[in-house]
Amino acid sequence: MYLTGSEQVLINLMLVLVTSTSVLGDFSSSPKDITPHKTSSLSLRCEPDADGSGAILAIHIKKKEAAGDAGNSTSLSDHVMSQRGVGESFVRTTITAGNKITVIPTLTRFQTEGTVTGSAYLMVTIQSPDIDSVGLYECQVTRLDDEGNVKVNTEVAEVLQEVELSLETLQTRVKILESQLPTIKVIAEAMARTVQEAKSSNELLEKDVAALKKENQELSDVVTGLTNQIRELTSRVDKVYNGQAEFNLDTGHVTSNDYSKLTDIVQKNQAETESRKEELEKVKEKLEELESTRIHILEEQMQSLREREKNVEDLAVKTEFIVNASFEPRIKELEKVNWKELYDNLDEIENKMIPNIVLNISKAQEDITTLQKSFKELPPQDSSLTTSVGNTTQQIPTTKEPPKFDGPACYVCGDNTTQKQCTSKTSQDSQVCPAGRPACMTDVYQNGVFRRIYRRCVTQEECQASPSKSNSQCKDDNFMDVKAMECHFCCTSQLCNDYIRPSRELVS
């Protein structure tokens, strides 16, 4: 995209005027964690500080990025489609002067409200948020300060996905952890062996360097000795030249005779000395070059091994961090579960409740069969009584009177004050409720793992207040999955609280 000169000047002017700082006010989401397709609504509210200087020009809320996509770039086509409102995910909403609000995309599930005057704010409510609603959101507040400069303040809020834990998911996570632990142990052992090998190689290299330094010192001592001999010989020759001593050709000592021969010998010895000195210098240079080369190679190898050792240690630290960050929280969550109580309940269900249910079903079937046979064997009877008065026979019809109760009959078991819950043996116990308690109540408490049920007689006031004390999911949940919630179901007919949620005369 190419800009004209005037457009470039305008952009430079805006960059001079606009400064980004931390937001003055509050930007938050309600709730902070959502369950996609289960949470009813998600509200994002951006409220600038009322004490901030200058007038507010606009408030802008936009979806910054999805969870786990931090740092990922968006393609140009995706940006254009978002700006046009293609799709059903929230993109952005803006309120400007005159309280004009725009939202992209324009769907009924995105409801907005706000104002830029007085107590300014902008709020967007997303109905039935899905997985795309999870992530980071950014609020931008554009205001004009007292000096006429435009300032943009920003704040970020994050919406997380709520994780539902159930017995099945916990068991699956335990199996995954158990299957991954051997692999992690093998990797850790291999890394430990690599570190040990690197340390051993480093020790060998240090020994080689020490041996080379010792050999170099010995060579230096030899060269120093030869240099001292050359200096001594040169000193003696200088004395002869200067007439300070004489040289005897027969004895090898300096005398006052035969200076010509002595001069030849001195010159010859001097030439040999110079030649030998040059050779020694070459040997010394070669030794120094060899020593420097070997030491340089060893230093490079040591540096490489140190880098490998550091990389291995960093990898070990990262692996340990990953293992601790990934598995320790999950293991701690699993450690919090009372597995003994869970297994005891499962054993009780498997070994006691299920056989009792099967036995009761068998007995009921036998009773039904016996009753059917008895009905077939009974002769047909008239429902009226026969009485004789004198010679006249009269038929007196009989009617079956309904049972009389002092109050309604309810199923009553357990005690929610002592947390003694209903069992398979007591769940069908019933009694006539006392005066003043004309309704039946079933209390259900779930903590995400276990469910406790109580049945009792209650007053009219307790019955009317039961819906407000229950979670909203109670009215439509099928109670097949275990989730944390509290439910109170009240009904007003005889023995109506026989199921978890009564199916008749339910007070809502």
Image (cartoon, rainbow, N blue to C red):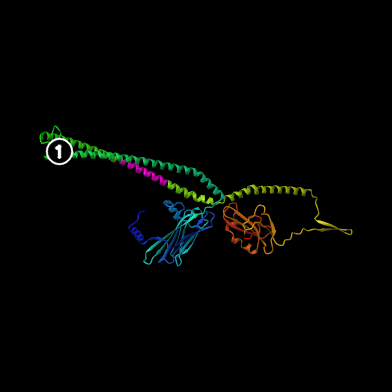
Q: Is residue 243 left or right of residue 81?
A: left
> Front-most of 235 and 46?
235
Examine the image and state in which quarter residue 266 appears. top left
- Measured as percent of width and height from the top left, residue 426 is found at 67, 54
Q: Is residue 240 magenta-colored?
A: no
Q: Is residue 36 left or right of residue 490?
A: left
Q: Residue at x 75, y 48 (%)?
A: 370
- Measured as percent of width and height from the top left, residue 94 is found at 45, 60
Residue 108 is at least partly visible in this image: no
Residue 262 is at least partly visible in this image: yes
Q: Is residue 297 magenta-colored?
A: yes
Tag 1 residue: 237
Q: Is residue 88 left or right of residue 54?
A: right
Kind of element beneath mark 1: helix
> Front-most of 420 and 398?
420
Q: Is residue 425 left or right of residue 173?
A: right
Magenta residues, start to end? 295-315
Q: Residue furthest top?
A: 250
User: Magenta region, mostly helix, strand or loop?
Assistant: helix
> Front-most of 265 and 353?
265
Q: Amino acid at mark 1?
A: Val
Q: Is residue 436 above or below residue 265?
A: below
Q: Residue at x 17, y 38 (%)?
A: 233
Give the position of the C terminus as an image quadrant: bottom right
